[in-house]
Image (cartoon, grey):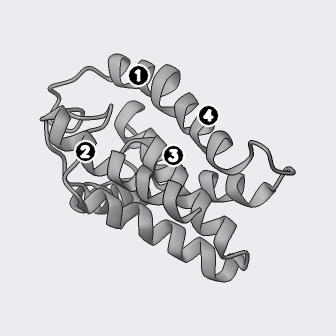
Amino acid sequence: MLSIAHGSTGALIASKIPNPFISIPLILASHFLEDRIPHWDVGQGLTSRKKCKRAAFLQELFFDFPLSILVVYLLFQVGRPFDWRPWFGWFISLVPDFLEFPYLFLENRSGIISKFAAFHTWAHRSTPNKFWGLLPQVLVLLLILLVR
């Protein structure tokens, strides 16, 4: 999924469940559960080498990542006093993707990174169709908007 969906989900969980011993495992589990839903994201085609790393990196850096920050700000901070919990949840929700970065972009195939990337790839269900791949993410965001 896009960082927009993962980050917003993590922000919601952390804002509703302030105990980190409960929220962190739930946030990490939600990342992999969301990735099980067939979806489209900026990394679509990286593992099969149908997309170049540079294009995926630039799309993530200038589109997905900043928009995830903006969406979390709009959903959880506008008109409210500063609360660190949504930002903590946003960060934790993206940790699995941060951990996969060395594997995908730096070709680091060391033991634990390689094993983690294999698990993440197993959990990932992608679709090249942008409409059907973005629809579940829009639905996730709408659900978050309703329950926040």
User: Which badge, 1 or 3, comes first in the chain's sequence?
Assistant: 1
Per the model, the C-alpha gap separating discs 2 and 4 is: 20 Å
User: Which badge, 2 or 3, comes first in the chain's sequence?
Assistant: 3
| Residue at the spot 37% in from the left edge and 17% down from the top edge | 54
Residue highlighted by disc 2? 135
Per the model, the C-alpha gap separating discs 2 and 3 is: 24 Å
Per the model, the C-alpha gap separating discs 1 and 4 is: 16 Å
Q: In the structure shown, which secondary structural element does the residue marked by tag 3 occupy?
A: helix
User: Which badge, 1 or 2, comes first in the chain's sequence?
Assistant: 1
**Which quadrant of the structure image shows residue 116?**
bottom left
Q: How many marks?
A: 4
Residue highlighted by disc 1? 59
Q: Residue 132 at what x, y percent from top left? A: 16, 42
Between circles 1 and 4, the one closer to the viewer is: 4
Q: Is residue 91 visible?
A: yes
Residue highlighted by disc 4? 70
Between circles 1 and 2, the one closer to the viewer is: 2
Q: Residue 5 at what x, y percent from top left? A: 44, 48
What's the amino acid at mark 3?
Phe
Per the model, the C-alpha gap separating discs 1 and 2 is: 19 Å
Picture layout, residue 18 above or below residue 45 = below
Quarter that holds the C terminus: bottom right
What's the amino acid at mark 4?
Leu
User: Which badge, 2 or 4, comes first in the chain's sequence?
Assistant: 4
CB atoms at circles 1 and 4 under 8 Å apart?
no
Disc number placed over residue 76 in the picture, else none = none
